[in-house]
Image (cartoon, helix red, strand yellow):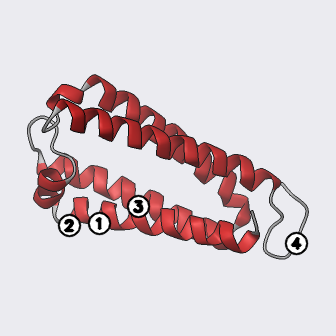
Amino acid sequence: MSERSFEVVLGLIGAGNVAVGLLALLAPDTFFEGIGKYGVENSHYVGDAGAFIAAYGFAVLVAIRNPSWRVPVLGLGAIWYGLHAINHAFDTGQASSEARGWADTISIALIGVLLAYLAKVARRLPGPAGEAPR
């Protein structure tokens, strides 16, 4: 993977997390109804989760221009999404349907795997100025 394509992937991941996070933070009821309808709605906690999701997205965006951030930020994301998937696996029955619960669980787990892979790639990829892999 080239440095440029890696930056594009980071941009997409960062922007996606910022968008989802801001939706949860600024419109928690909309987020709950459309994306995170598990259990009983609590707008405060949805907003709290949104703040973390947005912050993670901003960290990924910063990592585009700060290669030393890439491995730790992507590694943190892999752990977070992995734990998030485990949490969803226990609550599949609380989704709008069992199929939706498992689809969410699997998609979240796959994002975690992707982030772990990207952290591995980031360790081998030369930085923007062509410096040696980390």
Which SS class for mark 4? Answer: loop
In the picture, measured across the screen, residue 69 lies left or right of residue 27, that is right
Kindly indicate whether the residue at mark 1 contacts the one at mark 4 (C-beta within 8 angstroms): no
Name the outermost residue toward the right: 132
In the picture, measured across the screen, residue 58 lies left or right of residue 52, that is right
**Kind of residue at badge 2:** Leu
Q: Which badge, 2 or 4, comes first in the chain's sequence?
A: 2
Q: CA distance from mark 2 to mark 1?
A: 6 Å
Q: Which mark is residue 22?
A: 1
Which SS class for mark 2? Answer: helix
Across and down, in percent, residue 26 comes to 20, 66
Q: Residue 96's image quarter?
A: top left
Q: Which residue is mark 2?
A: 26
Q: CA distance from mark 3 to mark 2?
A: 14 Å
Across and down, in percent, residue 87 comes to 33, 29
**Kind of residue at badge 1:** Leu
Kindly indicate whether the residue at mark 1 contacts the one at mark 2 (C-beta within 8 angstroms): yes
Q: Which residue is mark 4?
A: 130
Query: Which one is in front in this view, the residue at disc 4 or the one at disc 1?
Result: 4
Q: Residue at x 75, y 70 (%)?
A: 3
Query: Which one is in front in this view, the residue at disc 2 or the one at disc 4?
Result: 4
Q: Which residue is mark 3?
A: 17
Q: Which badge, 3 or 1, comes first in the chain's sequence?
A: 3
Q: Which badge, 4 or 1, comes first in the chain's sequence?
A: 1
On the question of residue 130 being in view, the answer is: yes
Q: Residue at x 17, y 26 (%)?
A: 93
101 is higher (above) or lower (below) than 43 = above
On the question of residue 76 being in view, the answer is: no
